[in-house]
Amino acid sequence: MAENHSADPVQSRVRDCAAAIGALFNGVFGTLDHWRNQVEASTAWGAGDVDPAVYAMVEPELTAADPLLIGAGFIAAPGVVRGKGLHFAWWLGPLEDNPILGTTTEPSQLDLASREYADYLRDLSALEWYRVPEATGARHITGPYVDHLCTCDYILTLTAPVVVGGSMAGVVGADVLVRRLERDALPLMRAVGVPTALVSAAGRVVVSTDPQLPVGTLVDAGQASGSAVACPGTNLKVMAPTAR
Amino acid sequence: MSQEPSTNAPSRGARAAVFAQLTGAGRSEQVAQRLTDAILLGVLAPGDRLPSEAELAKRFGVALVTARDGLGAVRDAGLVETRRGREGGSFVLAAEQTPEKLLQARLRGLSQVEIADLAVYFGTLAAGCAERAAELASADEAERLTAWLQDADFGSARDSGRNAGGFYLEIAVVSQSPRLVREQIRLQAEFGPMLWLCLTDPAMRARVYAQNQRTAGAIAAHDAAGARASVRAQISDLSAWLLAAKERLEQGEAADG
């Protein structure tokens, strides 16, 4: 490895790439911060039906031209809105050939009752997109993973905790299809000039220009830390071959 | 709507699925099959009142006469009884008292080759998912799968059926393949209750649970060959159980006849 990183042009381009991908995700987290503020400030949702207000909030992002987000909403902590379980004020953007909803042109609200095959999940609040923000009080990127509750596709889920009166009231979140992210991330990664891979904290490849590291594979931890640059503000990293 | 942790009662979702729209030929047979499966796995419990014929027709998306024929077949099989009067309707009979009737109703309509082929199809999909999951599981995913299985209830036919199916869906998720997940969902919606018919037998419930533990252990150990072998052993058992049940049934019928 080169002694002086800053003099290494490849390493410098990897850092630029990581910064640009970080900015992409920080854009989405900015939207989540905005939603969180709205939810935290709202008095309507605590009292009763939160759904219309949440839909008004997320609808523009889901129906924009070529949207980055395929799903978005607010998931209320157990007991906060009606009933004992989590409450999903969650919408899916227009879908192509979804196994449950078919092809849709408008956003549709997630109805867990239609996901009878997911009955075996005993505790949805134990899932990473809820559990981690609850435990850390910080925003989090889950995945990439196959989401079988909403999109039945390979996605990343971004979530941020909503705190009201000092206690966890739920999470605001957004889903990004990996194949949609690919379109934005690949040009940034190709600009590095050598094969690179965007990997999750767990070492899972999200997007790659290295045919030896296809999407979904795991990169071992030592390999990942050796030549990886963190995307600022996220738990993702850009990996490139060690500078020669 | 909110999702509550599963209790002993099947969720609204499971009940909603029983009455989802039907497509394709032989719809009165499909009505009968859907109701039979639901009763067998306890989604419809003894004493439950079924929707009226008109309501069934509407929810299945079939003609009134089709719903009536389907319900009639379930009544003939001794699974429900229809009472007249103001408190009347069709009620589910106690399943424990009629296991043979349940088996007859379900297995009569299937040929040996259909059962064997279903096992090949499901086994190939499930073994492929397990192999891929063993190659690709992160430490977190393996731990979550193991923890979920640890607490999964395999005590009754209904709970073990739901959880045995859920186990294979989780494995498909860990395989990182949306196509495999979609295919698992489709296959289980179509054949799930049929596949898990053997879980009416307590010995099979214990066996399936032990096999699932071996599969989860192999996935956590990144042992693809072990995960595949364990899944194939289970599917082979399911297939043998179904074929044996059908054989018993038909030999019994021949003897009775």
Image: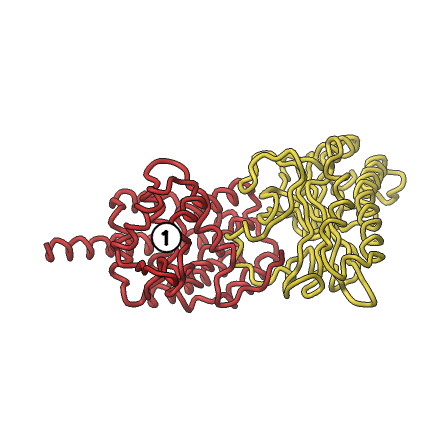
Chain colours: A yellow, B red
Taking the image as shown, residue B109 lies to the left or right of residue A55, namely left
Label 1's element?
A: helix
Image x and y of residue A136, in percent: 77, 62
Split into 4 quadrants, where in the image is the C terminus of chain A?
Answer: top right
Query: A131 or A45: nearer the eye?
Result: A45
Image x and y of residue B203, in percent: 33, 67
Which of the 4 image quarters holds residue A65?
top right
Taking the image as shown, residue B28 lies to the left or right of residue A143, namely left
Split into 4 quadrants, where in the image is the N terminus of chain A?
Answer: top right
Q: Residues within 10 Å of mark 1 (few under 14, many from 20)?
A: many
Q: How many marks?
A: 1
Image x and y of residue B53, in percent: 38, 49
Taking the image as shown, residue A29 lies to the left or right of residue B116, namely right
Q: Residue at x 82, y 42 (%)?
A: A27
Q: Residue at x 25, y 61 (%)?
A: B100
Query: A4 or A145: nearer the eye?
Result: A145
- The chain containing the residue under callout 1 comes to B
| Residue tagged 1 | B35
Taking the image as shown, residue A16 lies to the left or right of residue A79, namely right
Image x and y of residue A119, in percent: 52, 57
Query: B241 or A228: nearer the eye?
Result: B241
| Residue B127 in view (yes/no) | no
Which of the 4 image quarters holds residue B212?
bottom left
Query: B173 or B165: nearer the eye?
Result: B165
Q: Is residue A120 above or below residue A197?
A: below
| Residue A44 in view (yes/no) | yes
Which of the 4 image quarters holds residue A187?
top right
Q: Residue at x 57, y 58 (%)?
A: B142
Q: Residue at x 69, y 55 (%)?
A: A129
Mark 1 is on which residue type? Leu
